[in-house]
Amino acid sequence: MTSQDLPPNWSLMTMAQVLRTLPNGKLIEQGWSPQCHNQPSSDGESWGVLKTTAIQPGEFLGEHNKRLPEDLTPKPSLEVLAGDLLLTCAGPRARCAIPCLVKSTRPRLMISGKIYRFRTDESVMDPRFLELFLLTPGAQKSLDSLKTGISESGLNLTQSRFLGLEVVVPELEEQRRIVDILEDHLSRLDAADGELNNALRRASTLRNAVVRAELARFDGPLRTIHQLSDSVRNGIFVSRAKAEPNGVPILRIGAVRPLSLDLGDLRYSERDELDLQQEDSLLAPGDLLFTRYNGNPRFVGACAVVPEIAGPLTYPDKLIRVRITAREAVPEYVALACTVGPGREQIHSHVKTTSGQAGISGRDLKAVTLVVPSIAQQQLVVVAAHERLDAVAELSKMLSVSARRCGSLRRSLLAAAFSGRLTGRISDMEMVEEMAGV
């Protein structure tokens, strides 16, 4: 954007020109990252250091912190105060350069070394206006171009680059008018978002209820997964998997979701590295895949059935493959029984966390016990459950489309506001919908 593109009485300035000097004599203050307890400081009596997840787009979540050990001296100069603008300055690409304005906060929370703190010169810039500007698609695109680093999972935004970012600056009265209009529209979108998220959570609960109801239709003997399987095998460690489709496809850990397998979530590795002469390292239709490790215990033990596949396909060491015998069990039935109810509860009870990584062993997975009715009854359960699950999936898809529409409207609304096109009239949303293509 150039000054010629701006409405009358608007100008372009750099971040350095719209910020005021902080008590430390600088325009930007960076925090401190001591070794903290894993537990948060839950009240204002003990000091906490903010995690980057405390900063969400336009929202401050002070409960996301780690408690400072009692033997470390806090740094009160780094305490977050109402009116501070915060920005994540390090982390994965999607989490670097996220801004928020602290509207209120409890005492004794410090910024970490991955967070910048700054304040506007309020004779030039309303802090609410700057927060909203930094959330616009255009500003986020510019910030993205300023990030440095050699890995998508570890990028940085330096202070000097951030201070050079260009900001649109209307007159203060116009800034406040824009903020008032935006907050009115955004509050309605926030309400719609909240309802959609609640509906998506209810859809997830409905999915589990559907499966439980079908599993409860028939009784049968108890069998362990070990008794129902021909083999239980951990995946293969691959040191040099590539994104380019050259070699043997290997599923990524994120490909396995509850009752769903994303065959497009792949990496590739050389055949000799995988030692694929062992037939047991290749997947076959009907195999069950379980998540063996994950940073979040809730996702350990997620289970999906391998569908018909074309060509060789293998799996990494963070997954466990269970090959079900056809004599007593239908793979799809076992997957349902391991996803909800007592099967899922048993899997969860076996999950152990070591060095921040949650996992389950093949031995513990084999000990999980399920009710196993006849093959014919299992097939009835599978057909009925998937018919009802398809209906729930269609509902979830519709809700997700609506949620994405809200996101598009939000981005278009911000773009319209900071190009001088919001008037405060009802027709504003018609223009925004046209911009968003919805």
Image (cartoon, rainbow, N blue to C red):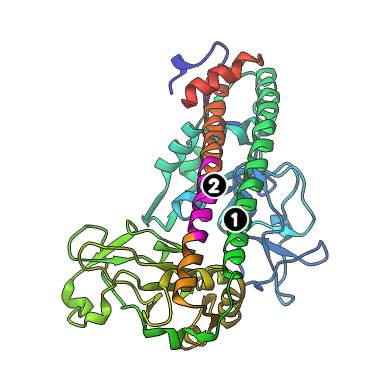
**Residue at figure coordinates x 39%, y 50% from the top left:** 148
Residue 179: horizontal and vertical position, in percent?
67, 26
Tag 1: Cα neighbours inside 10 Å, few (<14), some, or many (≥20)? some
* Three-letter amino acid code of the residue under disc 1: Ser
Tag 2 secondary structure: helix
Quarter location, residue 5: top left
Residue 258 highlighted magenta (yes or no): no
- The span picked out in magenta is 384-398
Res. 426 mark: none
In the rendering, at what x and y percent does residue 428 appear?
Answer: 60, 17
- The residue depicted at 66 percent of the width and 45 percent of the height is 59
Overall secondary structure of the magenta section: helix
128 vs 32, nearest the viewer: 128
Task: State the residue at coordinates (32%, 56%).
Answer: 264
Count of marks placed on residues: 2
Residue 204 numbered tag: 1
Give the residue number, with chain letter if any, for mark 2.
396
Disc 2 marks a residue whose amino acid type is Ser
Mark 1 touches mark 2? (CB < 8 Å): yes
In the displayed structure, does residue 235 sit left or right of residue 7? Answer: left
Residue nearest the viewer, comparing 121 with 314: 314
For label 1, the SS is helix
Q: Distance between the residues labelled 1 and 2?
A: 8 Å
